Image (spheres, rainbow, N blue to C red):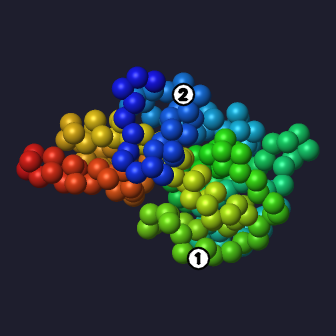
Amino acid sequence: MQNLLLPPSEKRKRFELRALGLREFAGVTGEQPLDPFALAGFARLLVVDFASIKGLSTESREHLLGVAADEWSGGACSRPLPNGWRLVILNPAHGAARNRATLMEEVAHVFLGHKANRLAAMTTSKKSSKPSGAAPKVLARDYNQADEEAAYAVGAAALVPYGALRRLLMAGRSAPEIARHFGVSRQLAEYRIKVTHLWAIYKRVAGALL
Ligand SMILES: [Zn+2]
């Protein structure tokens, strides 16, 4: 990889390198958006359509997509299927952008070699390092906190890589535009701008364009 542009902090550099490895594996470069669904199979994750889940009562279905919709984003079942694959369920109430981030985190857990132990119950999450608006996880709450942080950060960096983000910001693109370009939420785009210390550049360029 030539002209490798990395974020300033050591921790972010490490996350970025793993993320770039994932992007390379997926065959995307530069400013190309990454489709986590294309990577799920390599991670042996089987994404199941929520609507096709049998055995959920109408009441449960309505609960999960209604009043409880903000309490879960989805995740992978810790226990693999007999063929080694693991089921991933995504919350259809959250829309494509957030589903992509949730799936990307699960893909990152696998590629980073994280080990989940037991099947987690439905819980509401405690404090998390994720951007506001991100829903707590209900399934697969079994990774330790460091692994959770790494998977989320690497997944987010794979979706919105630093080099491309920096170029787009310098070209005057706004966070919502960048979010649309990469198929992520505005919150995720802003989270990436902040953690990679690009917020000052973003404000300066945006201010100069006014
Ligand atoms: Zn996770």
Determine whether the residue tagged by mark 2 lies in a helix, strand or loop. helix
Determine whether the residue tagged by mark 1 lies in a helix, strand or loop. loop
Give the answer, above or below, for where 159 lies relative to 116.
above
Q: What is the C-alpha distance between the residues marked 1 and 2?
A: 34 Å
Task: Provide the residue designation for mark 1.
Answer: 126
**Residue 24: numbered disc:** 2
The residue located at (81%, 42%) in the rendering is 85
- Beta carbon of the mark 1 residue lies under 8 A of ligand 1: no
Give the answer, above or below, for where 95 lies relative to 61.
above
Q: Where is residue 114 in the image (x, y as percent from the top left)?
A: 71, 51
The residue located at (63%, 35%) in the rendering is 39
Locate residue 200 relative to residue 163 in the image: left or right.
Answer: left
Dot 2 amino acid type: Glu
Say whether disc 1 or disc 2 marks the residue closer to the N-terminus.
Answer: 2
Say few, some or many: other residues with alpha carbon within 10 Å of mark 2 (under 14 / 14 to 19 / 20 or more).
Answer: some
The residue located at (32%, 53%) in the rendering is 197
Dot 1 amino acid type: Lys
The residue located at (71%, 35%) in the rendering is 41
